[in-house]
Image (spheres, rainbow, N blue to C red):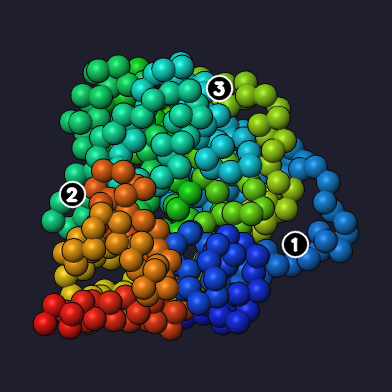
Amino acid sequence: MTTEPLRALPLDQLRQRTSAKWRTYPDDVLPLFVAETDFPLAPAIIRTLERAVALGDTGYTSGDSGVREAYAAFAERRFGWSPDPARMRTTADVSMGNVEILRRVVSPGDRVVVTPPVYPPFYDCVAEAGAEVERVPLRERGDGWELDLLGIEAAFAGGARAILLCNPHNPTGTAHSRESLAALADIAAGFGATVVSDEIHAPLARKDAGFTPFLAASDVAARVGFTVTSASKAFNLAGLKCAVMVAADGPTSDLLRGMPEEVEWRTGSFGAMAAVAAFAPESDAWLDSLIAAIDENARLLADLLARHVPGARYRIPPVGYLAWVDLSALGWGPNPSARILRDARVALHYGPAFGEGGAGHVRFNLACSPEVLTEAVERIGALVTGGEEERV
């Protein structure tokens, strides 16, 4: 049976929101930059939060919030993976979880591998943990991107102590293969290094897409790694503050248990309630509808770029609602988003912020209505047409 795509809220309602997506730029700008979605919340989340507000249930988050158990059941349904709730802890958000784990597996001045082009706060997370960034860019293949395992091995051989992995990868949407993840685990084990896998976009993987959580890639991966994840991207809950840190082995579980209680106290109460509702079976149909809408927009973007922005290079992302588009051929410099914002009034995330491989690129957010996406690309296309007319 075909899943009906979820429909975004109309622009007049969206502009009443007070989140970063809708307050960073004036109303004449179409905001397709930050990773927020334009869809109504899942009904189970709405009911849960309405009940909490009615009860005045706004105190500290309970250590028995149910998030760990809810995530374990979700991972089993969606990924065929059964993490142990007893080996999890919660905290405020995924970036905080990444930092707290890195602080405990590296020493000040150690190097941590990142794989650009990658989510810009990764660089800040490594610095916040007291470490230094070592860049090992993704390898571009004809049909996508992959980890440069030889480069990562060389970095570990040279003294890097950990890797902050993005799986699925932001901004390319790459879901690293089980074989690649298992090989990464073997390399890390050989050098006594740690893998911290940021899997915040994993809930957006289609059930049939074959997404592999890092800790499920192999027995070795379970020993050398941690997963940090959240419902925040898929269910648009970033402002409510709840993430899950997952271990799968005795020593790594001990590391999580040894964190100060304050790390878990930072979990938002509404975030925990919303996460339990998001990860519940009753929200699966809503999530499937969201993924169907994203898939529809991902294909639409390919058609729109072909019609209106010839020269743009774009691969439909395997997972998630972030589209990585190469506009280098347009000759708009290393940061084409600056001209697009100024002249087309469309806000996209700027490629150079993602590091090596980001020059000439922009990142689109596909979690919007087809109408908004169409208007955005048509506005950008008008710059291309205008530029051609000027050269004539």
What residue sits 23% from the left and 58% below the top? 333
What residue sits 45% from the left and 46% below the top? 199
Q: Position of residue 83 (x, y in %)?
A: 52, 40
- Quadrant, the C terminus: bottom left
Q: Position of residue 240 (x, y in %)?
A: 66, 53
Q: In this view, which residue lies farthest toward the right?
A: 55
What residue sits 54% from the left and 42% below the top? 94
- Quadrant, the N terminus: bottom left
- Please give the label number shown on residue 162: none
Q: Quadrant of residue 220?
A: top left
Amino acid on which the number 1 mark rests in the picture: Leu
Q: Are marks 2 and 1 in contact (CB under 8 Å)?
A: no
Q: Is residue 225 visible?
A: yes
Q: Nearer the viewer, mark 2 or mark 3?
A: 2
Residue underneath mark 2 = 140
Q: Label 1, label 3: how many angstroms apart (C-alpha)?
A: 32 Å
**Helix or strand or loop: what does disc 1 sit on?**
helix
User: Within 10 angstroms of label 1, few (less than 14), some, or many (20 or more) residues?
Assistant: some
Q: Earlier in the sequence, mark 1 or mark 3?
A: 1
Residue 323 or residue 229, whichever sits in front: 323
**Helix or strand or loop: what does disc 2 sit on?**
strand
Residue 368 or residue 210, whichever sits in front: 368
Q: Position of residue 295 (x, y in %)?
A: 37, 71
- Please give the label number shown on residue 49: 1
**Helix or strand or loop: what does disc 3 sit on?**
helix
Mark count: 3
Amino acid on which the number 2 mark rests in the picture: Glu
Amino acid on which the number 3 mark rests in the picture: Leu
Q: Label 2, label 3: how many angstroms apart (C-alpha)?
A: 35 Å
Please state if 354 lies on the left or on the right of 227 as rendered.
left
Residue underneath mark 3 = 255
